[in-house]
C-alpha cells in the first residue's frame, strides 16, 4: 500500500503531488515543472492536467481574481501570456469529460500547502478578454466542510461572464423541463454533462471485485519483476486507480524488465475465458494514445475470496483483438 493517496480535502505539498503523478521526477523546490508551474500536464496522459491555484498571486502586472461560489463554481485565469488561440487554452475549452481530467489543488495563501478539491468540469470562458483568459469551472461533487470552504472560497468574483443555468441549479435532485432547441451562442459554450454508464452487467459496478482483481494483478507484477532480478522496479509499481483515482485510463503503472513503462488496465470476472468486458472512453483513448505501453489484463474464473484465478494479456490497442460495440450514446441540446 502506498504511503499516501489522493484524498479529497486533504493537504498536499507540491512534492507530494509530484510523487503521486510523476514518481520518477527529480523534485526541486520553487524550480522546474512540479516545483514552480501553476499548470502541469500529467506525464504519459496528454489529456490530464494538474492546476495549482494560490490566492493573492500577481504576475506580469496582473493580479489574479479567483474564487469559488458555495455551489462550487471556480473562476480561474490562465497565465497572462496566454490568449484564446493558445493550444492549451483551446484544449481546456474543448474538454471532454470522457477522456480529460483536471485535478484542482488550491491554497488560500503562499504559506500553506494545497488542498485537493477534486476534478474540474468546464462551464464557460470569456470570449472577449484574453491574456489572461478567464474560465469558469464546476468543481465536481463539491461538498467541503464549512470551515474549509471559508478558507478556500477566495474573494467575491464579480465577473459573471457565462455562468450557465446548470451551474446555478440546485444540487438536490429535481424534475425539470428540457430546454427548447436553440441556435448555438457564440459568446459562450455550454459544458457537456458527464456520461453516466448504464450497463446491464452487475460486475461492471462491483467495485470490490474489481479491486480484488487489481490486487491479484499487482501481486503478479511484483512477482514477475522480482523473479527477473528487478526488485528495484517491483518496489516502484504504482496502484494508480487507488492512489490517484479513476480517470488515468489504466489501473496500474508497472514496468517491463528493461525499465520501460507498462500501463495496465485490469478487467475482472467470475465468468469464463470468453466473457466480454466493458472499456470506458478514457481507457479506450489511452490505449490508442499509448499502444506501446498499454496492457489489458483480463482476469477470469476469479475467486475473490481465495484471490485465485486465470488471466490473459492484450498488449496495445484492444481493437486489434476484440470487436468494440457502442452501448450508449451521449445526448445534448444544441
Image: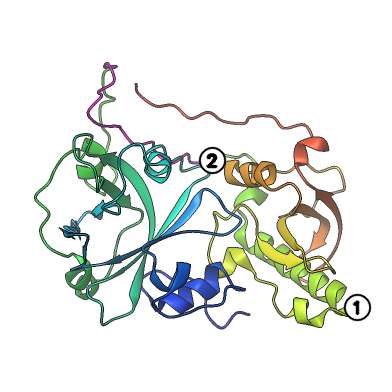
Q: Residue at x 86, y 72 (%)?
A: 224
* Rendered location of residue 256, percent (x, y): 82, 65
On screen, residue 281 versus residue 60, left or right, reads right
* Rendered location of residue 161, percent (x, y): 16, 39
Say if 115 sits above or below 176 in the image: below
In this rendering, does residue 306 appear at all?
no
Q: Residue at x 39, y 44 (%)?
A: 92
* Rendered location of residue 238, percent (x, y): 65, 71
Which residue is disc 2 drawn over? 197
Look at discs 1 and 2 and give the one toward the viewer: 1
**Residue 90: numbered disc:** none
The front one of 170 and 195 is: 195
In this rendering, does residue 136 appear at all?
yes
Main SS, magenta residues: loop
Residue 194 is a magenta residue: yes
Q: Residue at x 77, y 63 (%)?
A: 260
Which residue is disc 1 drawn over? 227
Which part of the image, by quadrant, shows the C terminus? Answer: top left
Residue 259, quarter of the rendered image:
bottom right
Crowding around mark 1 (Cα neighbors within 10 Å: few <14, some 14 to 19, many 20+) is few
Say if 107 sits above or below 168 in the image: below
The front one of 201 and 76 is: 76
SS state under label 2: loop
On screen, residue 44 versus residue 133, left or right, reads right
SS state under label 1: helix
Q: Is the C-beta separation of discs 1 and 2 under 8 Å?
A: no
Q: What is the span of residues highlighted in magenta in the rendered image?
A: 181-196
Q: Which of marks 2 and 1 precedes in the sequence?
A: 2
Q: Residue at x 34, y 44 (%)?
A: 122
Residue 65 is a magenta residue: no
Which part of the image, by quadrant, shows the N terminus? Answer: bottom right
The front one of 174 and 116 is: 116
Amino acid at each position: 500500500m502506498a504511503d499516501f493517496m489522493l484524498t479529497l480535502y486533504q493537504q498536499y505539498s507540491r512534492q507530494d503531488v509530484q510523487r503521486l503523478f510523476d514518481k520518477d521526477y527529480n523534485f526541486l523546490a520553487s524550480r522546474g515543472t512540479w516545483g514552480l508551474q501553476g499548470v502541469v500536464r500529467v506525464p504519459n496522459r496528454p489529456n490530464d492536467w494538474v492546476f495549482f491555484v494560490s490566492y493573492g498571486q500577481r504576475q506580469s502586472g496582473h493580479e489574479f481574481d479567483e474564487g469559488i461560489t458555495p455551489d462550487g463554481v471556480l473562476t480561474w485565469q490562465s497565465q497572462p501570456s496566454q490568449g484564446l488561440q493558445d493550444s492549451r487554452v483551446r484544449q481546456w475549452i474543448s474538454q471532454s469529460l470522457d477522456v480529460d481530467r483536471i485535478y484542482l489543488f488550491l491554497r488560500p495563501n503562499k504559506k500553506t500547502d494545497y488542498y485537493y478539491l477534486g476534478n474540474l468540469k468546464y462551464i464557460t470562458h470569456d470570449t472577449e478578454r484574453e491574456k489572461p483568459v478567464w474560465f469558469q469551472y464546476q468543481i465536481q461533487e463539491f461538498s467541503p466542510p464549512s470551515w474549509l470552504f471559508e478558507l478556500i472560497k477566495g474573494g467575491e468574483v464579480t465577473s459573471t461572464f457565462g455562468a450557465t443555468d446548470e451551474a446555478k441549479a440546485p444540487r438536490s435532485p429535481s424534475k425539470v423541463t428540457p430546454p427548447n432547441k436553440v441556435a448555438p451562442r457564440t459568446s459562450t459554450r455550454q459544458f457537456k454533462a458527464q456520461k453516466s454508464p448504464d450497463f446491464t452487467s452487475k460486475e461492471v459496478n462491483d467495485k470490490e471485485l474489481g479491486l480484488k482483481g487489481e490486487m491479484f494483478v499487482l501481486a503478479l507484477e511484483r512477482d514477475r519483476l522480482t523473479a527477473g532480478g528487478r526488485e528495484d522496479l517491483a518496489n516502484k509499481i504504482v496502484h494508480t486507480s487507488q492512489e490517484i483515482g479513476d480517470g488515468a485510463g489504466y489501473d496500474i503503472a508497472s514496468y517491463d524488465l528493461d525499465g520501460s513503462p507498462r500501463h495496465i488496465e485490469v478487467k475482472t470476472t467470475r465468468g469464463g475465458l470468453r466473457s466480454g468486458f466493458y472499456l470506458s472512453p478514457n481507457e479506450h483513448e489511452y490505449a490508442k494514445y499509448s499502444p506501446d505501453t498499454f496492457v489489458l489484463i483480463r482476469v477470469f474464473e476469479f475467486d475473490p475470496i481465495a484471490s485465485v484465478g486465470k488471466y490473459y494479456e492484450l498488449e496495445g490497442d484492444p481493437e486489434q483483438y476484440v470487436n468494440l460495440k457502442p452501448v450508449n450514446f451521449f445526448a445534448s441540446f444544441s
